[in-house]
Image: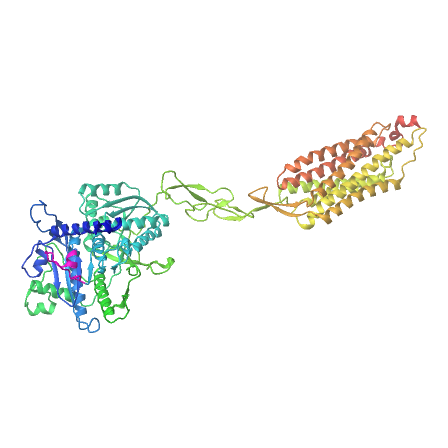
Amino acid sequence: HWSNLNMQELEYIIQGICYKTVVLCILAVAQPKHTSQSPALCRILGSPEFPMLSKEGDVTIGGAFTIHTKISEPPLSFTDTPPPLTCSSMNLIDFHFAQTMIFAIEEINNSSSLLPNMSIGYRIYDSCGLTLSSMRAVMALMNGQERTVGKTCSGQSAVHAIIGASDSSSTIVMSRSTGAFQIPVISHLATCACLSNRKEFPSFFRTIPSDFYQSRALAQLVKYFGWTWVGAVRSDNAYGNNGMATFVEAAGVEGVCIEYSEAILWNNPREKIARVVEVISRASSKVVVAFLSQWEMAVLLEEALAQNLTGLQWVGSESWITIDRLATRRSSAVLSGTLGFAISKSKIPGLREFLLRFWETTFSCRFSSQEEKDSGPRQSQCSGSERLEEISNPFTDTSELRFSINVYKAVYAVAHSIHDLLTCRHGEGQDVNFTMKSGERVYFDENGDPTAIYELVNWQRDQAGETVFVTVGNYNASLPNGDKFAMNGIQIVWAGNTLKRPRSVCSDSCLPGFRQSEIKGMPVCCFSCIPCAAGEISNLTDSAKCTQCSLEYWSNGDKSRCVPKVVEFLSFDETMGILLAAISMVGACLTIVVSLVFFCFRETPIVKASNSELSFLLLFSLTLCFLCSLNFIGRPSEWSCMLRHTAFGITFALCMSCVLAKTIAVVIAFQATMPGNTVPQCSIPLQRISVFSCTLLQVVICVLWLALAPSVPFRNTAHATEKVILECDVGSAIGFWAVLGYIGLLALLCFVLAFLARKLPDNFNEAKFISFSMLIFCAVWITFIPAYVSSPGKFTVAVEIFAILASSFGLLFCIFGPKCYIIFLKPERNTKKHIMGKGHAKSQ
């Protein structure tokens, strides 16, 4: 009833018809012709038809192995029945797998604990290593070999499980065909991560780890040895393409860049293989990651030998890294020092004896011991090459069973699954979990994968010059990230059979103190090294960025670490501090000397005329002014910060008060002596009161400043990035400028009064000297303001000290210099008559 179907149902029906049509076509092309020969070894090895080993049993397990590696496709005329496909080029390794499967089945059949009273049969097909023949094999395993189409279908498969195939592409074809019928496929060599997809391959299992783990292990391996610039070659099939895609993704996470990525197949024309080898030889990377099957690696190796491709470090995948036929003396020129992950080796008790018996029975010969040789031969000696030309007998080699053990596990997994099902051990589910005779535990995760455990293998030479596979490390994906990869301490031999590890980087490493800078248009592994900026560091090799030091730290000379910033302040140990301190002491000493001079000549007219009491008080204040500048030198502390500005303010206020009192006294004195003037003479108490009151006001300002917002030590990190300026924070800017403003006000009053009294009649008019000293004082402090604001660090303090010293020296020299000049050099002028002058006498 087509009218009742929707479009989706019609699509499913059409897809099913197409699928069955394709299957019938494949069967027609691939079906071998019937033979009446018995399944003897001659049929397996020499027949042009698809070979098959079989044995009946209560339960049948299918097998598909690449017993031959080449297949000739017959011409199709579409008029006659197609001739059978012909397979050639014997692959003794997979024949070994097939015999291992038979050995495991026979061992189980002889077991009294596993599937007792039940026999297991087998049907083993040759897939010839191609998807076409693999499809034929799986269809034959599911449906049998009958070529006629019956009217009824039993609905039962010819086999209960299939072991195989020996490559990922063939296994994908088989699993897609069997998945719809829930026939388990357990592969011993298919590692493609794509097969872990339970939606596409619901009945697939494997006893070899997925490339999901191997690819990541390879990426961690090249990163571990510092190879950030590598080349890549892969098989152009599901195994190589999926494995390399995962490797490239994982390598990017590890910071490893791929210079080139080439794909080959074993049956590609030689020109293509030669082009790939040329790409490898021209590349700048010195490490090649080869995600190849043993067949692709074999053809690549031949071309590499032909082009003399040497000096490269090869990193291989598990498919070829332990293949004996690749590790020859001839290939060591190219592959010496090769590294790669291999399946852990194991042993199967009794397998070697089984293989020897099979060989002896088939060829009617015997592998004799030394005692049997001495007693005389009973049968002809087995040479190991009976009808197997150019094969050196790897068939009986069971020294390192890295892949055969996977076939052995697969057979036992099927047997345990059936056993558990029959005994209802796991209910409706079939969670296979058992322990081998060797103690190894076998189980599958939710994706049908086993635990990924690898050995890191290194190709080294023994004393005889033969290549041996030495285990130098391990990788266990079940462990935490930091513990997955571990070396065992054995010395690694590198490319060229040397002990020096090769370097493979696009750019040389950036040393500490530099950072990486990407080069436009290049991978991230190609970079230039840029020095870190001032105040930034990088303490690791190949740092991606520089780290900013904290506020209290600065980068050292090579910018590799942060060191405490230089603390800057004006100290007594540096030249500037010593010079300023010396000048301050010289000024104080000069002032004391002048005081002594005045004291010694206190009875002379010149000293009496200058108001000796105010002069001594002024000299005292000047001494304090010189000495207070010392408080600005040295490491700022809490006390020194509070003292320096207040002491400076009070001493200068006292100094200016004395000068102001002297100026007022001069003006009043001359005004009082003029004819007709009734202004009273200036008294000493009035002078003292004026000095005290003017100084007291400054003391009040300083006390308020200290009480409300005192000056405190401050670590200034903003003004200079490379150093910490240790200075005194004024606390209150209003208090600071109020102190300076008050001193300036007193100085301005002194200057105005002295300027007005500069022309009073006297040979020694002190007002004009005070006027000149105030002019110097005001000029110094007016210049101080912009210099103070703009000077950085310790120079701010130096400017302030210079202003104090300059103004103090100005007062000392201008007011007391002329008096000392008369006292010492012009004593004849140190008389009352000369000091009073003619003009004053006339006014008298």
> Residue 187 lies in what quarter of the image?
bottom left
> Residue 184 lies in what quarter of the image?
bottom left
At a point 90% along the width and 39% down the height, the residue shown is 683
Numbered label tally = 0
User: Is residue 222 within the magenta segment?
Assistant: no
> Residue 185 lies in what quarter of the image?
bottom left
Viewer can see residue 812 = no
Q: Nearer the viewer, residue 780 or 299?
A: 299
Asked if residue 446 is positioned above or below residue 253 in the image, the reply reads below
The stretch of residues the image draws in magenta is: 139-159
User: Is residue 149 within the magenta segment?
Assistant: yes
x and y, in percent, of residue 424 in the image: 26, 71
At a point 63% along the width and 47% down the height, the residue shown is 714
Viewer can see residue 759 = yes
* Principal secondary structure, stretch drawn in magenta: loop
At a point 28% along the width and 53% down the height, the residue shown is 194
x and y, in percent, of residue 166 in the image: 20, 56
x and y, in percent, of residue 810 in the image: 74, 35
At a point 91% along the width and 36% down the height, the residue shown is 681
Horizontally, residue 176 falls left or right of residue 629, namely: left
Q: Nearer the viewer, residue 390 or 85?
A: 85
